[in-house]
């Protein structure tokens, strides 16, 4: 009897040990499974944050003139932006680059909720991007004197640029970039912080730039009399009330950006940024010299636009040299990737 009791006791101990071991194994497996699920959820969340907006979505565009908000497919919107922002006679690879830049700019703008509730983007070029519908684009081209065959060719190029790059956006380390662009920057583009201050963006740095010299707005001249110059500076900043004509006679450029553009000018006791002058006096760029006359200032300007990101004239120049639209994008935006949105 004692032998049987000892046997059952030993068997019970073995079963208890086996049960404990199996419990520990299952607990370990469950813990690992939960860890994998958490890691997978974290990965999905990170991917969602990287590219929040999906391809082919409908966006809401505010028409500035009427205040109307129009819902349209993203591709239809881009067909209206590309020819509104870039000349239609540019090389097709330059137009494709503009399409990808415009798409990226759009999604980045939407992700920032920059236009407020119920609106994704507007048609004001000074605030978002220029936009005209197809009928408006064709009317503009007709006023420029393009015949029907040329108009068909240009519209086909616009459509090809949008469709052949469909769903492609520019990213830096998985995030949509701030896809700034401008008309012309002979010699070099500009680093973003040199123009607007704030953070440095590693993909928006000054790069060497080559442009066709026959661009009609490559150089420009703006002459402003002393009185108008002082009046606008005072309107912009009330602290400049002491400015007078003698200050204008002694105005000078006091520093430059790393790309060679004017950064600030000195007038009287005040330092004024060149970017502020560009917007106040409609200068085409901040790459200028100042000529002082008896009663006026003459700004001799090179280039067109703020100088940050893609240069449209440069893009056309590089395209004519055989660059693809991807080559062009990678030239103007340092260290970026061209990413395709999921459907």
Image (cartoon, rainbow, N blue to C red):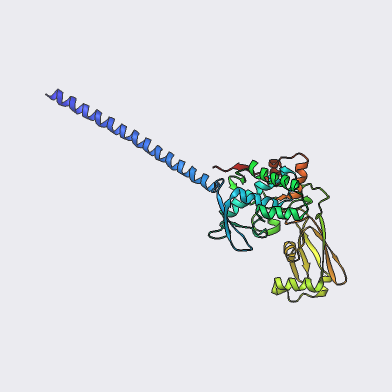
Where residue 163 appears, x then y in whole percent?
Answer: 63, 43
Instruction: Examine the rendered structure and indicate whether residue 121 appears above or below residue 165.
Output: below
- Outermost residue toward the right in this view: 294
Residue 231 visible? The answer is yes
- Outermost residue toward the left in this view: 1
Q: Nearer the viewer, residue 65 or 217?
A: 65
Which residue lies at the image location 78% right of the left edge and 42% below the top edge?
320
Q: Nearer the viewer, residue 199 or 60?
A: 60
Which residue lies at the image location 69% right of the left edge and 48% below the top edge?
98
Where residue 152 appears, x then y in whole percent?
Answer: 71, 46
Which residue lies at the image location 69% right of the left edge and 46% below the top edge?
158
Residue 84 visible? The answer is no
Q: Quadrant of the C terminus?
A: top right
Where residue 78 appears, x then y in whole percent?
Answer: 64, 50
Q: Nearer the viewer, residue 123 or 279?
A: 123
Where residue 268 appears, x then y in whole percent?
Answer: 78, 71
Q: Nearer the viewer, residue 159 or 242?
A: 159
Instruction: Examine the rendered structure and indicate whether residue 130 appears above or below residue 271.
Output: above
Instruction: Examine the rendered structure and indicate whether residue 152 appears above or below residue 235.
Output: above
The answer to whether residue 232 is left or right of residue 18 is right
Q: Quadrant of the N terminus?
A: top left
In this rendering, the count of numbered labels is 0
Instruction: Give residue 226's quadrant in the image.
Output: bottom right
């Amino acid at each position: 009897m004692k032998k049987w009791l000892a046997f059952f006791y030993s068997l019970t101990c073995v079963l208890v040990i086996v049960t404990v071991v199996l419990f520990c194994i299952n607990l370990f497996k469950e813990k690992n499974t939960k860890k994998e699920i958490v890691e997978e959820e974290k990965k999905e969340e990170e991917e969602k944050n990287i590219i929040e907006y999906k391809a082919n979505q409908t966006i809401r565009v505010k028409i500035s003139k009427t205040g109307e908000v129009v819902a349209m497919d993203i591709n239809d919107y881009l067909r209206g932006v590309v020819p509104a922002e870039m000349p239609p006679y540019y090389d097709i690879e330059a137009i494709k680059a503009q399409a990808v830049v415009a798409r990226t700019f759009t999604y980045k703008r939407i992700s920032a909720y920059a236009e407020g509730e119920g609106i994704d983007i507007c048609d004001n070029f000074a605030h978002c991007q220029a936009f005209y519908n197809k009928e408006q684009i064709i009317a503009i081209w007709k006023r420029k004197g393009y015949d029907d065959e040329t108009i068909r060719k240009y519209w086909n190029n616009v459509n090809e640029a949008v469709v052949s790059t469909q769903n492609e956006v520019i990213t830096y380390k998985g995030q949509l970039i701030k896809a700034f662009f401008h008309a012309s920057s002979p010699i070099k583009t500009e680093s973003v912080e040199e123009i607007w201050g704030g953070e440095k963006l590693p993909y928006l740095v000054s790069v060497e730039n080559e442009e066709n010299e026959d661009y009609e707005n490559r150089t420009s001249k703006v002459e402003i009399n002393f009185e108008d110059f002082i009046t606008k500076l005072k309107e912009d900043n009330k602290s400049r009330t002491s400015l007078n004509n003698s200050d204008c006679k002694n105005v000078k450029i006091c520093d430059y950006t790393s790309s060679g553009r004017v950064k600030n000018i000195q007038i009287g006791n005040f330092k004024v940024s060149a970017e502020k002058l560009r917007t106040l006096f409609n200068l085409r760029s901040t790459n200028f010299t100042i000529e002082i006359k008896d009663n006026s200032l003459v700004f001799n300007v090179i280039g067109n636009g703020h100088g940050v990101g893609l240069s449209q004239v440069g893009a056309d120049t590089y395209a004519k040299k055989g660059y693809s639209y991807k080559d062009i994008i990678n030239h103007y935006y340092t260290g970026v990737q061209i990413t395709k949105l999921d459907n």
